[in-house]
Image (cartoon, rainbow, N blue to C red):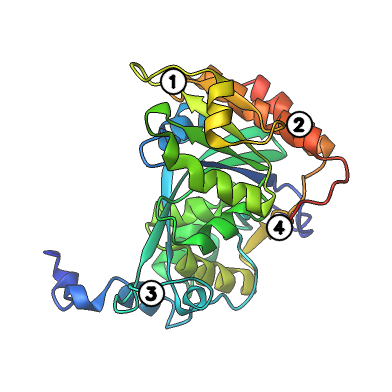
Amino acid sequence: MDQPENVWLDDEAGPVVRPYAMTRGRTRPSSGEFDLIALIVAIQPAAAVSAGLGPEQTVIIDMCQHPLSVAEISAHLDLPVGIVRVLLGDLLDSGFILTREPRRVMQSPGEPVLKAVINGLRSL
Amino acid sequence: MDSARSEDDEGIPLAIKMLIAGGFGAGKTTLVGAISEIRPLRTEELLTEQSIGVDDTSGVERKTTTTVAMDFGRISLSDELVLYLFGTPGQDRFWFVWDELALGAVGAVVLADTRRLATCFQSVDYFERRGTPFIVAVNCFDGAPRYGSEEVRLALDLDQEVPVVLCDAREKESVKEVLIALVEHVMAATPGEPAPV
């Protein structure tokens, strides 16, 4: 709590204040699901799209030049995943990213995928 | 990186996940770290009002926020397939996070420490109730009492079809075998049988 930006926050305020300020109070993304393991990829380099983006969103675009999961983006930015979802929702709306959501079903992913997992693990 | 990549899945791998559960100190993060291609990372979920509605948070309502941390690792299995391993959070009262993690998971490994076997009861119960396929991996710590897999099966009151394997969570080869055993168990359990809810 000795960094300058923390001076006006005591423990009672809690860490929620600043993260949700970053999303202008929004707790849900305007679009998209953004499962923890949804993979995100940027369509263009950050330099091409940086106008009008917040610093975190520029960093996300930078990171996602190769597909990265929502969980990894959250970990690298050191931001709660709920915040990251809102930031990603804006990027999706603006057409800066593509996403691939996982299957969110209570079923086996099917034999071809399972076999590919075994083969992939064996060759590690 | 051109406009041809406009369709949803094109060029983006499919991600799947497995859960690594077990009591505190059973070696979950060690196991993830032994096989992950990245240093295990930590992501946090804020306990929001939305989750308070479905979770028993009695006792925490005066706190402004609560965070639940999840450690995870990544294994790129091919150009089309990425496997994420998530350690389940230790705070067992945050079941909604377990529910989110378990949804769509291939299956789970319950890592057991024979010195504190009781600490994985909750994980076993959870996956049994939910119908998530799981195996039990006994982490053979140096100096820990060595039990056979049948003794562990009895102690945990596991169904016969739940595999119990011995492992060393520090060793990549050993962890590989554990994950393969889980996938083989999932394949064996798959044929059309609806999972109990």
Are both tags, 1 and 3, on one chain?
yes
What residue does disc 1 label?
Answer: B140
Q: How crowded is mark 4: few (under 14 residues within 10 Å), some or many (20 or more)?
A: some
Whether residue A24 sits left or right of residue B18 in the image: it is left
Tag nearer the camera, 1 or 2 = 1
Are both tags, 1 and 2, on one chain?
no
For label 1, the SS is: loop
Q: How crowded is mark 2: few (under 14 residues within 10 Å), some or many (20 or more)?
A: some
For label 3, the SS is: loop
Q: Give the quadrant of residue A110.
A: top right
CA gap, disc 1 to disc 4?
34 Å
Q: Give the quadrant of residue B118.
A: top left
What residue does disc 3 label?
Answer: B58
Q: Give coordinates of residue B37: x percent, y percent.
A: 51, 32
Tag 1–tag 4 contact (CB < 8 Å)? no
Q: Give coordinates of residue A22: x percent, y percent.
A: 39, 75
Letter of the chain that mark 3 sits on in the rendering: B
What residue does disc 2 label?
Answer: A116
Amino acid type, mark 3: Ser
Letter of the chain that mark 4 sits on in the rendering: A
Amino acid type, mark 2: Ala
B84 relative to B101, above or below:
above
Whether residue A18 sits left or right of residue A28 in the image: it is left
CA gap, disc 2 to disc 4?
19 Å
